[in-house]
Image (cartoon, grey):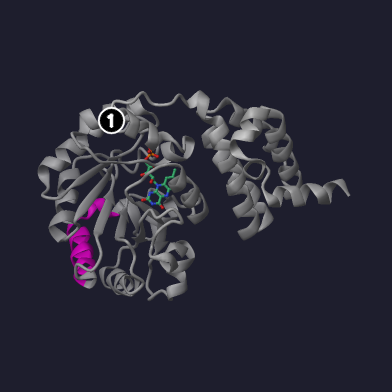
Amino acid sequence: MEGLLDCRLRAIIARAGRYDWCVTEFIRVTDTLLPKRCFTRVAPELGHGSRTPDGTPVRVQLLGSDPVCLSDNAARLVDLAPAGIDLNFGCPAPLVNRHGGGAVLLDEPALLNRIVAQVSRAIGGRVPFTAKMRLGVHDNSRALEAAQALTEGGAEMLVVHARTKDEAYRPPAHWEWVARIAEAVHAPVVANGEIWTVDDYLRCRAASGQQDVMLGRGAVADPFLVERIRDRLVERTPRSIAADWPRVLPLLFDYWESVCRDLAPRHASGRIKQWLNLLRRNYPQAETLFQQLRSLRDVAEIDLALHMFGRELMRDDEIAMMGRNAIFPKASREFCLEISV
Ligand SMILES: Cc1cc2nc3c(=O)[nH]c(=O)nc-3n(C[C@H](O)[C@H](O)[C@H](O)COP(=O)(O)O)c2cc1C
């Protein structure tokens, strides 16, 4: 998810749960053949067999509207052996839409069909090829037409975010429309949108008639959601969210360490706050931490606050369970030392 789930958070969320595959944030294709580094910057996993460190396959997403340019770039991307290529026809961002990319293309089924056909030819069956769509631009009157244009053009699987562009990310998601689309096309369909809990998953499955779902913000808000869903599927009682905070905290520290290592300080602080902002939907402790961090800008201050928070909140037995290094990562200790000098 562009601006939210990058390769670092992807690695952490994928490690926490067991996903069949995941997809990168979009890479924008306009009118040039992108150098390989543009693909590997967004998907460094391409250098590691297109897998996250825990081995989850990573598909790479392209966004654009020019069939020739998209297919040239897809051909170049295939040379990097991605675990799959996905085309984005769901992005509602005005900047993207103004340039004719993302969800606005859903009003142009003929163009959708040409794009997908040309990209499919360029890929030549060498890697899985999927497309992500919404139900339409302003309403869902052309949803079936758009879905058919995509699958008849050559998309091997459709991920349907069950909202229109105008609905942006507002609930509800219209899962019953995923069922209608699945009936209208000859390709597997994956339901997406508004799955935050195991119950949402079960309701989505019932309404959409699809076994497979794609988790979006729900997976970031609860890194163990996929585990809870899998537990329910084998009729094991899912662990309660309340019990899982001690498992979330080390993930948060790992993420903090990685953003501090890789990003400019202001981006690092923005990223950790963004994740906490979603985590606080489920974890009261994340709300407390979010409130403590929200006005802090300085990386060292945030680091100290995280360190103190971890120390205060964890009981001795929880610290012992996870190991001290998991809770107080190396980068944190170093920053704290600098402050106390
Ligand atoms: C901040 C943000 C960035 C997103 N970036 C992408 C993206 O790059 N590619 C994409 O296919 N979907 C993107 N999405 C959409 C999500 O993948 C997902 O389809 C959508 O949020 C609906 O699922 P959810 O309600 O479970 O979050 C983004 C969503 C958000 C909130």
Q: Nearer the viewer, residue 277 or 325?
A: 325
Q: How many marks?
A: 1
Where is residue 230? Give x, y as percent: 33, 34
Q: Residue furthest right?
A: 341
The stretch in magenta equals 105-121
Q: Can residue 203 be spotted in the picture?
A: yes
Q: Nearer the viewer, residue 81 or 187?
A: 81
Where is residue 212? Give x, y as percent: 25, 41
The answer to whether 221 is drawn above or below residue 60 in the figure is above
- What amino acid type should be assigned to the residue bearing mark 1? Val
Q: Which residue is mark 1?
A: 234
The answer to whether 328 is drawn above or below residue 284 in the figure is below
Examine the image and state in which quarter residue 112 appears: bottom left
Q: Nearer the viewer, residue 213 or 12?
A: 12
Residue at 34%, 31% (x, y): give it.
Answer: 231
Q: Residues within 10 Å of mark 1 (few under 14, many from 20)?
A: few
Residue at 76%, 44% (x, y): give it.
Answer: 301
Left or right of residue 240, residue 234 in this image: left
Does the numbered disc 1 mark a residue whose Cβ is under 8 Å from ligand 1? no
